[in-house]
Image (cartoon, helix red, strand yellow):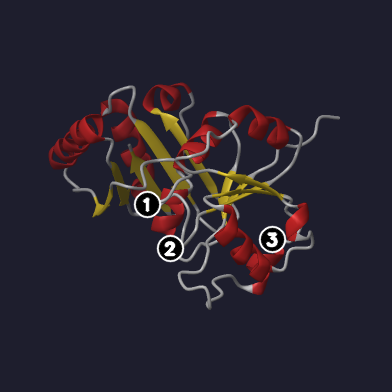
Amino acid sequence: MQNQKGKLFLIPTPLNENDDCLSEMQKKSIYLFQNFIVENAKPARQALKKIGLKNSLQELNMIENNKNCKFDYQYFLRKIKNGENFGLLSDCGLPCIADPGSDIVAYCHHNNIEVRSIANTSSITTSLICSGMNGQHFEFIGYLPIHNNQRNDQLKNFYTQILNNKKTFIFIETPHRNQLIFDDIINSAPQEIKLCIAFDISGPLESIKTKSIAEWKKNKIQLNKNPCIFLIN
């Protein structure tokens, strides 16, 4: 029987070394992890020590991911396909927002590897860090215009900015308009634009998927009336 794929879990680290940013329930979800992708090993060890992992720090498989290290994606994929989970954390705060890691998350989406966030205090930041999109240059829009012409004009403006500077745009919609917004985007955006659908975050149907417009057109979905966040990049 083939092993079930592992998952990538995004783990917050304290903004202050004296703080503890995880609840006991959140800690329990990563107690048994063996593999961690970290920005730098020393601060990562300090953060992981507070979690109280079942494995000792010396036994952990800790892989650095920063400008001085070339990440081995093939090794990562082999481990994931073998059913092993990975935790991803930065030196401080949430990974993938003004920190390394979004390329690894994007790789997971491309290879159908599930990405989950340990910290779900904000659906906006959760959707961004789990999307694999640009976490250095992004903007939260709120709601798009209701009127079709105004909405389409605003979307076209977003597409131009994305193609010019890779900016990420994040917006929400009332649940009964989820399908309308999804259809509008895949019918108007250039094929190379990426769309993330972050659906029912922290709920029983949670799904965070990032695909190109071309890929979404081949795999159209029906969104029901659960909370949903849209990201384009």
Q: Which residue is most to the right?
A: 1
Q: Residues within 10 Å of mark 3 (few under 14, many from 20)?
A: few
Of the residues shown, which amino acid type is indicated by label 3? Ser
Q: Earlier in the sequence, mark 1 or mark 2?
A: 1
Of the residues shown, which amino acid type is indicated by label 1? Ala
Query: In 3D space, how far apart are the residues under numbered discs 2 and 3 (Cα atoms)?
Result: 19 Å
Figure check: 144 above or below 232: below
Q: Is residue 179 left or right of residue 12?
A: left
Q: Which residue is mark 2?
A: 122
Helix, strand or loop at label 1? It is: loop
Mark closer to the observer (1, 2) = 1
Of the residues shown, which amino acid type is indicated by label 2? Ser
Mark closer to the observer (1, 3) = 1
Q: Earlier in the sequence, mark 2 or mark 3?
A: 3
Q: Residue at 59% of width from left, 54% of height from top?
A: 41
Q: Quadrant of the N terminus?
A: top right
Figure check: 134 above or below 189: below
Q: Which residue is mark 1?
A: 98
Can residue 207 be spotted in the picture? yes
Q: Which mark is residue 57?
A: none
Q: Which residue is mark 3?
A: 29
Q: Residues within 10 Å of mark 2 (few under 14, many from 20)?
A: few
Q: Which residue is most to the bottom?
A: 18
Mark closer to the observer (2, 3) = 3
Q: Is residue 170 left or right of residue 47?
A: left
Figure check: 114 above or below 227: above
Q: Is residue 221 left or right of residue 47?
A: left
Can you give x and y, in whole percent of width and height, for residue 139 in the image? 26, 50
Helix, strand or loop at label 3? It is: loop
